[in-house]
Image: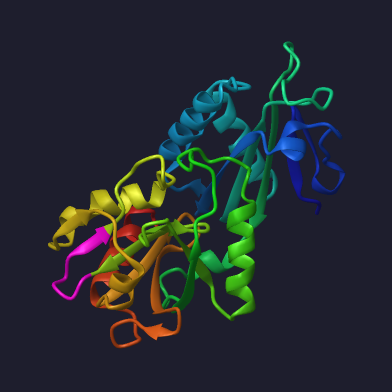
Amino acid sequence: MPSYAFVDGQYMPRHLAQLPLEDRATNFGDGIYEVWVVAQGKLVDEQKHFARLERSLGELQIPMPMGRPALAQHIQRLIRRNNIRFGTVYLQISRGASKRDHVPAADIVPSLTIFTNNKPALADARLSPKPLKIITGPDLRWARRDIKSTSLLPNVMLRMEAHQQGCHEAWMVDDQGFVTEGTSSSSWIVTPEKVVVTRALTNDILPGVTRDTVRELMSQSNHKFEERAFSVEEAEQAAEAFITSATNFVGPVVEINGVTIGHGQIGEVTTILRDLYLRAAGL
């Protein structure tokens, strides 16, 4: 049974889907994207992802190709058509296609692409999570990191470096030596005093949806919470560290730059927050 995609108003077998040669997401990285996790056939943090999608489009002055209810309907149709119980939905909106020029044509129309990926392993999220090893590297991205743009080259290069070193993720570091975020995740530490710390929201980082949900759940964990910058050195000396993202949920970090974090095992606070998030997500 073929997997289907939705491209500019049409459902088609995924292997036949294609974008125009001069689509601006391809030529300029001029577009945005969102990724939802599907659990039990339902979108996790659905409305928060839609809100971030709309915000990113607004910041780039790209109009929504259709309203939120219509987008949600097409996503649900793809989930059903592709029989996705546990998986992901990728949605991309580019400014559209026109003759390649830095200034787009005045009559350009946004392009919409949606496809799904089946990930049955997500059903086992309650099993012991994989301990993660990470590296750090310079944050070479542009100044508007709060926009979920398709321009991901610095993220890709640093993630490739992490992979080459046998690590799962990389944390990006600003010019002052403070961690901004991961290449595809938000960065967190737990201090020796059991204070949970993550960087405050500014244009320096993406407003992570999972980050926001975990922040809301902090009130149930009985731990002190701070939004502030932390250095690589502080992270390496932390009692615990973890990442948050749509597909990793709350992922325990046990090693940073070869330095063992805490006792090198999944920490108590990380375990509590992961459990709270999975329950909230219906997993």
Q: In the depicted view, which residue is nearer to us: 86 or 66?
A: 66
Instruction: Please indicate whether residue 208 sits to the left or right of residue 191 in the image.
Output: right
Give residue 35's position: percent from left, percent from top. Answer: 55, 47
Q: Residue furthest front?
A: 175
Left or right position of 262 against 209: left
Quadrant location, the C terminus: bottom left
Residue 195 position within the rendered picture, expressed as x and y whole percent measured from the top left: 17, 65
Quarter of the figure that contains the N terminus: bottom right
The magenta span reads 191-197
Figure quadrant of residue 99: top right
Nearer the observer, 198 or 265: 198
Q: Position of residue 165 (x, y in %)?
A: 59, 80
Question: What colouring style does the render use?
Answer: rainbow
- Front position in the image: 249 or 136: 136
Task: Say left or right for 135 vs 193.
Answer: right
Looking at the magenta stretch, what is its main secondary structure?
Answer: loop
State the image coordinates of residue 26 (x, y, percent, origin top left).
76, 39
Residue 41 visible in the displayed image: no
Q: Is residue 179 visible?
A: yes
Quarter of image, res 32: top right
**281 or 193, nearer to the observer:** 193
| Res 174 → quadrant | bottom left
Q: Residue at x 41, y 45 (%)?
A: 204
Residue under the point 63% across and 32% down: 74
